Amino acid sequence: MDLEIHLPAEVPAMTLPHTVFFPQALLPLRIFEPRYRQMLRDVLGSHRLFAVARLDPRRAGSAEFEPAHRIATVGIVRACQENDDGTSNLLLQGLARVELLAVVREEPYRFVHLRLLNSTPGAAAGENRRLRATLARLIALKHKFGAPAPRDFTDFLKTVDDPETFVDLAAFSLCPDPAFKQTLLETLDIHRRLELFGAQVRAEIDAIKLRRKLQGNLPDDRISSN
């Protein structure tokens, strides 16, 4: 989507092990660690912004503290409720892809220097709309074959016309593989992002078909008897 976004050059950041956050997506979070409680108090008193990055498992064994993937998403706190025990439940809405250029400091919580990343169409608008429609059909087919998907979300997704918003929301909510989600997050070419996700959903559908063929009429708990 063509939105003019002005971000600070430095924002707080959370690094989470299995979470890949996307622009426009809504991420519920429970804030309980003391450092993140302090971070939340600070952002609520200012711009309400912080970044969410996925922990990079390739560097998890290094001496670096909580090594994060370089590409992340900055979000804005849309709603927040503090609990009696001092924890908080919040809803973060993704605003933009960003590149984490450097960690400015780690205390009392991580603060990062970043730059805004803008997507590129990669193809004509009509071609991206065609791929969006193809991806929508594949998602519906996968759901028809029994893949889990939140009913309310799939209904909502049908109303999203913008190809970039569509693929980002679909990837965030329907893609089960964090590594592949990270790849999609890092793909700035919208046309390529649509192609990649479409190919992935096709492969998942083929896997479901093969599993059904091999399973025959046996229930799931007796597939090993086939």
Image (tube, rainbow, N blue to C red):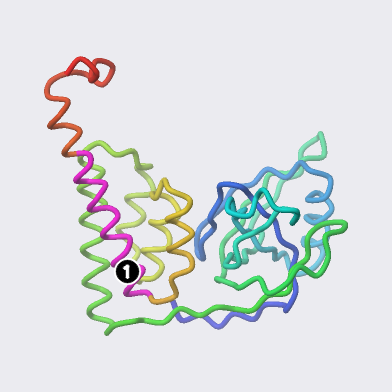
In this figure, which residue is indicated by the disc labeled 1? 161
Magenta: predominant secondary structure element? helix
Compared to residue 152, the image places residue 51 above or below, namely below
All told, the count of numbered labels is 1
Q: In the image, what residue occupies the spot 40% across and 56% down?
A: 171
**The residue tagged with tag 1: helix, strand or loop?**
loop
| Residue that lies at the very extreme toward the front in this rendered image | 62
Q: Residues within 10 Å of mark 1 (few under 14, many from 20)?
A: few
Whole-percent x, y for residue 80 in the image: 70, 50
Span colored in magenta: 190-208
Whole-percent x, y for residue 124 in the image: 27, 84
Q: In the image, what residue occupies the spot 20% across and 48% down?
A: 141
Whole-percent x, y for residue 91 in the image: 62, 52
Q: For this view, does 176 lie left or right of residue 205?
A: right
Is 134 colored magenta in this rendering?
A: no
Compared to residue 84, the image places residue 201 above or below, namely below
Compared to residue 178, the image places residue 188 above or below, namely below
Q: Nearer the viewer, residue 43 or 112?
A: 112
Hey, what amino acid is under mark 1?
A: Asp
Q: Dividing the picture into quarters, in which one does residue 13 lie? A: bottom right
Q: For this view, does 57 lie left or right of residue 177?
A: right
Whole-percent x, y for residue 111 in the image: 78, 65
Q: For this view, does 39 lie left or right of residue 96?
A: right
Q: Quadrant of the C terminus?
A: top left
Is 191 colored magenta in this rendering?
A: yes
Compared to residue 91, the image places residue 159 above or below, namely below
Q: In the image, what residue occupies the spot 68% across and 57% down?
A: 67
